[in-house]
Image: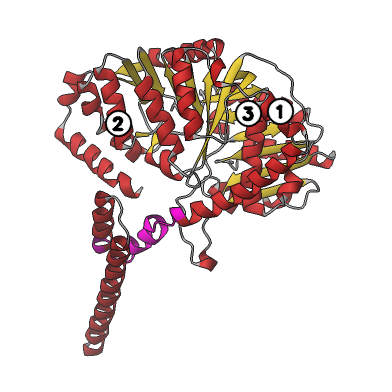
Amino acid sequence: MHNNIHSLSLWVLISTLIHLIAFILVCLHCLKRRRNPSATMLWIFTAWSFPLFGPLLYLSFGVDRVPEKGLEKFEADQIMKKMREVREKEDRPLTTWDKHRSDPGNYGTELGRRIHMLMDAVTPDHPLLNNNMITPLLCGDEAYPAMKAAIEQAEHHIHLQTFIFNRDDTGREFLELLKKKAEAGVHVRLLFDRFGSTHALLGGLFRKYQRVPNLEIKGWTQANPLKRQFQVNLRNHRKNLIVDGRVAFFGGVNISSENTTLNAQPPIRDYHFKVEGPLVHELQYAFLRDWHFMTGTPPADLLSTQCFPVLEPVGTAQARIIDSGPSSRSQVAVESFFNAIVMAQQQLLLVTPYFVPTSDIMQALRSAAQRGVDVRLVVPQKNNHHYAGMASRSLYEDLLKTGVRIFERQPPFIHAKAMLVDGAIAIVGTANIDVRSLELNYETCVLVSDDVFANRMKQIILEDIGLSREINLNEWIQRPSYRKLAENLCSLMTPIL
């Protein structure tokens, strides 16, 4: 009995020492560089309150390797840029970027001129391009048939990139179609995010396709335990498909059966887009930069004539890509949304599944409403990430008091992302209005100036507003105290999640 007590005491002493050492190391690392004070205090609290688990959580999510890892991606992007400049001098089809580039005197309305002049400075590597046709596709029910048809017609290459590739009927169907085209001689590249596609990866979905000729499959990650790199925060959230360099798709739709109608159950509500015109080359280039970074494939092999065929004008839309992520020299996504909000004069329609914005975007929305802009925010009534929905609701009161109108869209869950400014300028793509999308994820959005596109997007958003419940300020203030506490707690956790 005495030996058991002695062993237990020794174990408690050792555990306590390990906990103290781990806690001190976390504190020292937190204070090593200046960062958000609330996040620092929360990490210190977590490390102390949850022995072993807290430090491990900090190791995975809290260690700020974003500048270091972002620099690696930035350097890889610069290598691609240099080869692109060489190709352009060789008078290859890559010169179509210049052919369709819009000059400042052709930026359209006064709103368009102001936004695009500013965007020229924010994202100088991605100019405004004329002559595009961009078609909205609602949910997988509309997006998948169009994507599969394009894949079926592929003659040279297929480049598919997604955050979630599910181990379900839809995932298998896409893989079988890609296999079929690869076996027919089409070069297929598939890039999926290893975090977002965890179930498919661990379930062995990709294993049987790894040795198919002409089919290359790669998982995106910037974490490597063998190199003591435990940062899983940097995720590739892009969802792009480019076929033969002539047609492309982008938006919010992942590869999952949840995006389709099944057994009379409606799909996840989402916006996806088909692109024809010079913007296809920008989406192609964005994919190839990511592929080069993850695989090391030489840029000269990627920037081929077949990947960038000559494209003729097909539409009236002016569009520019907003390619954001930690590799950017500035917070491109934050600045793009912030400036669009600040420039709104009449109406601002905003749709996002996760609304946990940066403080400056939050203030911009409040200021827009206070100066008389009709600001309407559409979010899910039931969020698939419960804590994110609770964190969003902690912000409602501040917004409602300034005149922002908030609409909770009834199920099914709405995963769409869109902003429409004054019924004329749209930003659509993959970025949510939350800190993760705006500062950590690699995202692809497109800023579009086109009356036809803007009118269609306004119609779609108003349809979602029509299927929503508007939040009333007086009723909201009177909600139970326990809900307020839960919401504020979830909001407090956002700096580390």
**Residue closest to the eye, 485 or 319:** 319
- Give the spatial CA distance, label 3 vs label 2: 30 Å
Q: Please give the range of residues in magenta.
A: 48-67
Up the image or down, 200 lies above or below 371; here it is below
**Which mark lies nearer to you, 2 or 1?**
1
User: Mark 1 sits on what residue?
Assistant: 96
Most common secondary structure along the magenta stretch: helix
- Disc 2 marks a residue whose amino acid type is Met
Using the rendered view, name the quadrant where residue 95 is placed. Answer: top right
**Residue closest to the eye, 448 or 272:** 448
Q: Is residue 388 magenta?
A: no
Q: Position of residue 65 (x, y in %)?
A: 44, 57
Residue drawn 25% across the image and 89% down it: 3
User: Mark 2 sits on what residue?
Assistant: 362
- Disc 1 marks a residue whose amino acid type is Thr
- Give the spatial CA distance, label 3 vs label 1: 19 Å
Label 3 element class: strand
User: Mark 3 sits on what residue?
Assistant: 249
Label 1 element class: helix
Which disc number belongs to residue 228?
A: none
Q: Is there CB contact under 8 Å for labels 3 and 2?
A: no
- Disc 3 marks a residue whose amino acid type is Phe
Q: Earlier in the sequence, mark 3 or mark 1?
A: 1
**Residue closest to the eye, 222 or 334:** 334
